[in-house]
Image: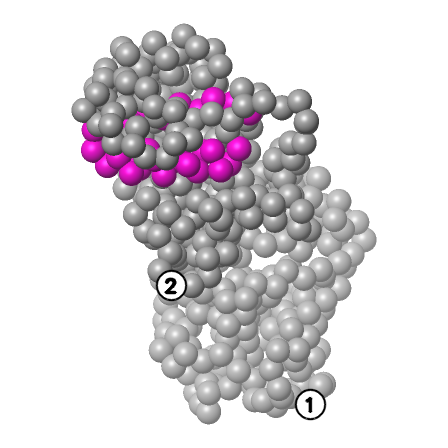
Amino acid sequence: MAKADAFAIASGVPGIALMEAAGRAVAAAVMRRWPRRPVAVLCGPGNNGGDGFVIARCLHESGWPVQLGLAGAIADLKGDAAWAAGTWNGAVEPLSVALLKGEPLVVDALFGTGLSRPIGGAIGDVINHLNERRLTVVAVDVPSGLHGDSGHVLGRAAKAACTVTFFRAKPGHYSEEGLKRCGDLHVVDIGIPPTALATIAPRQWLNGPVLWRELLQRGDLADHKYARGHLTILAGPQATGAARLAALAGRRAGAGLVTIASPRSSLSAYQAAEPGNLVVEADTAAAFSKLLDDQRRNAFLIGPGSGIGDRTKDAVLAVLAARRSLVLDADGITSFAEQPHRLFQSIGGEVLLTPHEGEFRRLFADIHGDGGKLARVRQAAALSGATVLLKGPDTVIATPDGRAIINVHATAGLATAGSGDVLAGIASGLMAQGLTAFAAAAAAAWLHGNCARRFARPGLIAEDLLNLIPDAMHSAITVN
């Protein structure tokens, strides 16, 4: 945003014009959502506080009763913030909990995305009071205390009913803490030229069909099952439902054929299940490796119910040596917990790792959380050489070259056994059809979440997701 502001100013847009537009946009959002009521505008010592002075003036001019509290002294304000303070003719009171008497609507203009230190002292007391009393809060840019890049809470952070941010959303808005604290997010135009993006060259996107929908549109009448790809899944002797869920998800996602490679001991369990799943015996990694002789087997999924151990590990290494598309999940990841570098040194081609937080820590023990989830996943992708999808309410997908996508299109209903197997099946089914690991991961994460949204009631289990995949795909292709 600093670059965006600088670009706008260099393009002839004065800084005070940006601040005026930002303040007016927040005031307009307040007046659209709530009837006239007392407002406490809490201003910080920087440009976020300057926005607060403009907001207070706009609300006051529209007949709203406004109190304004400032953290610091007016004489210490600089630049555009000092200008904005000069346009406010009302009283300026010291920031304190006393401003919140009577439970007014609160505009949080204390700190924006530039905050880099934990909040404490009197400002921390005010934020604690906001949260403890559950006052209605409108956050300017970000809830104060939420880091705009990492999504970390710096000491404490306000919880807002809505957040108004400028030009583009920030990664912190879509972090797990951001999702808890931002409320309804509004992104508004304040006059920054769109061409600023070319200068900034961001390498992260919010997930949505616009990024990958064209890759799902297949309408060739000459298509046949092998043209849609052949996905092979390594199954294990236990947790047989995992491979079955993944196989059905892969087929629903469009893979032409799906084969479950099963140990002899559980072969009958897979053969007696869904008739559309092909089943072959692969009691050992060597037997599984022979399946690679068929070049039409272009995509593999190893992990859901595969079992932890040498059979799984050796199967993974065989697929990687053959440079076939691979999704590595669950047991496939954990099998390399003691030898992660052996896995990383073998990776080449289109490979997707889909860990949850526990599996991520096992494989990437040396990567810590200081920079936030987005930074961690980027580091993991660069270290491993694979595309990495780290699951969560803020699922992050990153490539070794640093491109990243954040997916928040999901519900808490996905916290159920087998849900991850369905996700892995969708992703591998898409890779069987020729999608890159990055595109398949992004599409699978969104489609998976869209299935949960379509269920839209309590009681969701993994099996429910499967029959919703076609509708999710159709909506991704057809709905603007």
Front position in the image: 34 or 39 = 34
Residue at numbered disc 2: 458
Asked whether 229 falls inside the magenta stretch, the response is yes
The amino acid beneath tag 2 is Pro
**Neighbour tally class for label 2: few under 14, some 14-19, many 20 plus, Cα within 10 Å:** few
The picture quadrant where one finds residue 34 is: bottom right
Residue at numbered disc 1: 63
Front position in the image: 338 or 331 = 331
Q: Which residues are magenta?
A: 228-254
Task: Give the number of marks.
Answer: 2
At 73% across and 54% down in the image, what residue appears? Answer: 192
Relative height, residue 102 to residue 13 (above, below):
below
**At numbered mark 2, what does the secondary structure look like: helix, strand or loop?**
loop
* Residue 27 at least partly seen: no
Front position in the image: 212 or 103 = 212
Relative height, residue 456 to residue 206 (above, below):
below
The amino acid beneath tag 1 is Gly
